[in-house]
Image (spheres, rainbow, N blue to C red):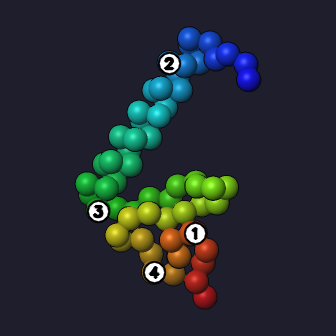
Amino acid sequence: MSKISPEAQKTLAALRKAVADALERKRRLGHYAVIWRDGRPMVIGDDAPSDIAQNGDVIE
């Protein structure tokens, strides 16, 4: 594995913080979010659409 430059590390940290902040805001507002987990989209949150399973599959 190659070493990440200090600039790239700062950029990655900023992106991670931005995503964490956005997900926290959605959680506080009661909005659902679509995230990527284990190579698949996944819906998280209490108000997720009922026609989308928690694993991202569309329910017909």
Q: Which residue is mark 1?
A: 56
State which tag comes first along the sequence, 2 or 3: 2
Report x, y in % for residue 14.
Answer: 45, 26
Return the x and y of residue 32 as percentages of the image width and height. 40, 63
Q: On the rendered image, what quadrant is the N terminus found in?
A: top right
Q: Residue at x 58, y 55 (%)?
A: 37
CA separation, marks 2 and 3? 30 Å
Q: Secondary structure at mark 2?
A: helix
CA gap, disc 1 and disc 2: 31 Å
Residue beneath disc 4: 50
**For the residues bearing labels 4 and 3, Cβ distance under 8 angstroms:** no
Residue 18 is left or right of residue 38, and the answer is left
Q: Earlier in the sequence, mark 4 or mark 3?
A: 3
Secondary structure of the residue carrying numbered label 4: loop
Query: For the residue marked with disc 3, what is the amino acid?
Result: Gly
Question: Amino acid type of disc 4?
Answer: Ser
Tell me if 4 is positioned left or right of 24 in this view.
right
Residue at numbered disc 2: 10
Q: Which of the 4 image quadrants contains residue 33?
A: bottom left
- Which residue does the numbered mark 3 point to in the structure image? 30
